[in-house]
Each structure stands twice: as structure tokens, then as C-alpha cells.
Amino acid sequence: MGRPYRHVMKSQRANTIAEALEDMILSGDFAEGERLDEIRLAERFSVSRTPVREAFQRLAQSGLIEQIPRRGVFVRRPGPVELVEMFEVMAEFEALAGRLAALRISDAALAVLEAANDNCRAALSEGNADLYYVENERFHHVIYEQSGSAFLQQEVGRLHRRLKPYRRMQLRLRGRMSQSMAEHEDIVAALTAGDAGRAADLLRGHVAIQGEKFHHLMASLRAAAE
């Protein structure tokens, strides 16, 4: 096999390990402040240390670990205030991306959103939250791209990566996938109609974790910590 194929396989292994570690941290398998042993994790996942290091880099982007030079890698969970602040900013980023995309989105991009929604419906019917998240991520990144703002796309992409573990966890809450699916359909309708204000409002509400959504997420995190 050629070098590009090997590179893709290594990246996929790192992603798989990162997602497994995300689940383990959020489910309480690792305690706050616990040191993660690179060698033991490499043995646990039957890989070399390289994909484990790459997985650590992904976890550092989402703020779930802290890498301290000459000391190691330690579990770090954002507190509720920090989480709320990140979701508030993310909701406004998404609203802005939606408002701009409603004015600029192409027919080809709308077709990609519809295809992503079709795959989300299939994942919903299977009860597969992880598959739903993959297509959900695709859905949102199309909107970021169609905003036409490279700077916004870069900034919202960075925060999207930071919140990925928590957005994945949200989709496992009872009824959240079906609610998200209905919201996706409304968002596509607003983008298709070129209704910038409605697209912004829908995306803001889709991402924000005020009220009941916040309490559900906090309850899940609290249960894991206990």
C-alpha cells in the first residue's frame, strides 16, 4: 500500500482512539486530574504510541486533557460555567453562519444538506447516535463553508472541535436525535427560501443548551462523574 493510504489509516486509528477516550472520560472511567499513560493505552488499543499521541492532540483541542511538558497528559473536564459560555458563543457563531449561508448557499450545497439529512434519518431509524453525529457534523460544516467567510469557518470549526464530545453525548439523550432531525429540516427549508433571519434563529436554538437541554447535559455529566 502507498504512503497516502497508510496516512489515512493512521488518522482513522487516531480518530477511533480519540472517540473511545472521549467516551471513557465523559463516562467517568478516568477521574478528573488522572494521568493518562501513553504506553498502557497503546497496549490497550493494540497500536503503536503514535496514534495515541495523535489522539491526545485531538482531545487537547476539545479541552478534555491537558498536556503538561515533562509531566504528562492529565484529564481535564470543563466546569458548567465554561461549558455554558462555549455553547453560547457556538450558538451565535452558528446563527451568523446560517444568516450568511441563507444569502449565499448554492443549489449543489443544498443538495448535500439534503443528502446529509437523509443519512441522519437512516441513523435515527437505527437508533445509531454515533452515525447520526457523523452526518450532523457534515451538515453543519456545509453551512460553515457556505457562509462565504473563511475567517468565520476557521473560528467556528475550532469551537466545533472543542464541543464535539458534548454534542455527541447530547445525541444519546432520549428524544434528542428526533428533535435534532426536525430542526435540521426546518433549517434546510429556511436556507432554501433564503430567509436569513429565520435560518439564524433556527441554528441558534439548535445549538444553544439553555433550559432543559442544559439540565439534561449536566445530569449526564454528573452521573458519569459519580
Image (cartoon, rainbow, N blue to C red):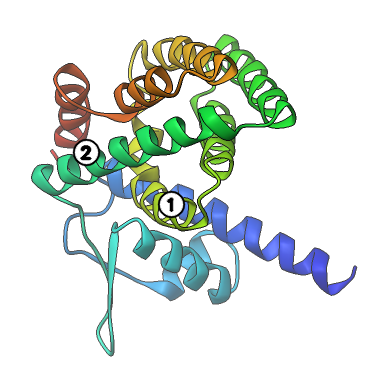
Crowding at dot 1, Cα within 10 Å, few <14 / some 14-19 / many 20+, comes out as some
* Depicted 16 relative to depicted 53: above or below: above
* Closer to us: 180 or 32: 180
Outermost residue toward the left in this view: 81
Outermost residue toward the right in this view: 1
Label number found at residue 175:
none
Q: Which residue is at a point 29% across and 59% down the rendered structure image? A: 63
Q: Which residue is at a point 47% across and 36% down the rendered structure image? A: 100
| C-alpha span from label 1 to label 2 | 16 Å
State the SS at label 1.
Answer: helix
Q: Nearer the viewer, mark 1 or mark 2?
A: 1
Mark 1 residue type? Leu
User: Would residue 91 be visible to someone looking at this image?
Assistant: yes
* Depicted 10 relative to depicted 161: above or below: below
The answer to whether residue 101 is left or right of residue 115 is: left
| Residue at mark 1 | 152
Mark 2 residue type? Glu
Image quarter hosting the N terminus: bottom right
Q: Which residue is at a point 83% across and 74% down the rendered structure image? A: 3
Sequence-wise, which precedes: disc 1 or disc 2? 2
| Residue at mark 2 | 88
Q: Position of residue 75 (x, y in %)?
A: 24, 61
State the SS at label 2.
Answer: helix
Image quarter hosting the C terminus: top left
Q: Position of residue 35 (x, y in %)?
A: 25, 69
The answer to whether residue 186 is left or right of residue 61 is: right
Q: Quadrant of residue 116?
A: top right
